[in-house]
Amino acid sequence: MHSVFYWCAWIGSVLLVVQLVLQIMGLGDADLDAGGADIDVDSGLDAGDPAHGTAGNVFFGVLSFKALVAFLAVFGLTGLSLEDAALSQFNHISLAVLAGLVAMVLVAYLMRALHQLGSSGSVVLANAVGRKASVYLRIPANGEGRGKVTVEIQKRTVELAAITDGDSIDTGQVVEILEVLPNETVRVTAA
């Protein structure tokens, strides 16, 4: 069993170091172009995210390349470290497998937590409803034309086309956004 633990520890540790170096270089989950052939380095085997209502299974969320490499490394290192312990071979292997499984689940949990920190960066215009905006370009009365307003949405200043059903609204006036319409247009009223 010594050689099994030894090679598992070596292979797992080397792959962990390679993953770490690639991640630091920004190549951990990217597409590479190697001499005209595209190589997909994203190694996740995640079948979906159950927390977001997709058809995934929690078990498959644990089966990613990073988690499997962590299992391999910890299984091998634990097996090597327990060689001098007065344990039966069954207990020796069982503890090594258990330690590897714990490492695998921990890595999967950490990867999922890191993934949830990400943001799409897209501004959701529906968040503009009810906000105050400043008229940037005069808004004609009774929806006869479009003006422009600037509004802060999700900590970003956004310029949108605007119409009003009431009297015209001059540049510099403050308005309230009532509704989001197609083509990045909003319906406003004087505030």
Image: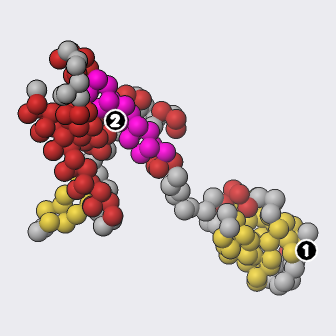
Q: Of helix, strand and loop, which mostly describes the magenta segment?
A: helix
Instruction: Identify which residue is drawn at 68% across, 74% down.
Output: 157
Q: Is 61 contained in the magenta span?
A: no
- Is 162 above or below relative to 182? below
Which x, y percent locates residue 144? 79, 74
Mark 2 or mark 1: name the one nearer the start of the chain. 2
At which x and y percent is residue 75?
A: 24, 33
| Element type at mark 1 | loop
For the C terminus, the image quarter is bottom right
Q: Is residue 1 visible?
A: yes
Dot 2 surroundings within 10 Å: few (below 14), some, or many (20 or more)?
Answer: many
Of 1 and 149, the residue lying toward us: 1
Callout 2: helix, strand or loop?
helix
Residue span colored magenta: 95-113
**Depth check: 125 or 64 in front?**
64
Q: Is residue 160 above or below residue 75?
A: below
Q: Amino acid at mark 2?
A: Met
Residue 25 falls in image quadrant:
bottom left
Badge number at residue 104? 2
Give the residue displayed 18% in from the left and 60% down from the top.
38
Q: Which residue carries the number 1 mark?
A: 167
Residue at left offset 23%, top offset 18%: 87
Q: Is residue 37 left or right of residue 152?
A: left
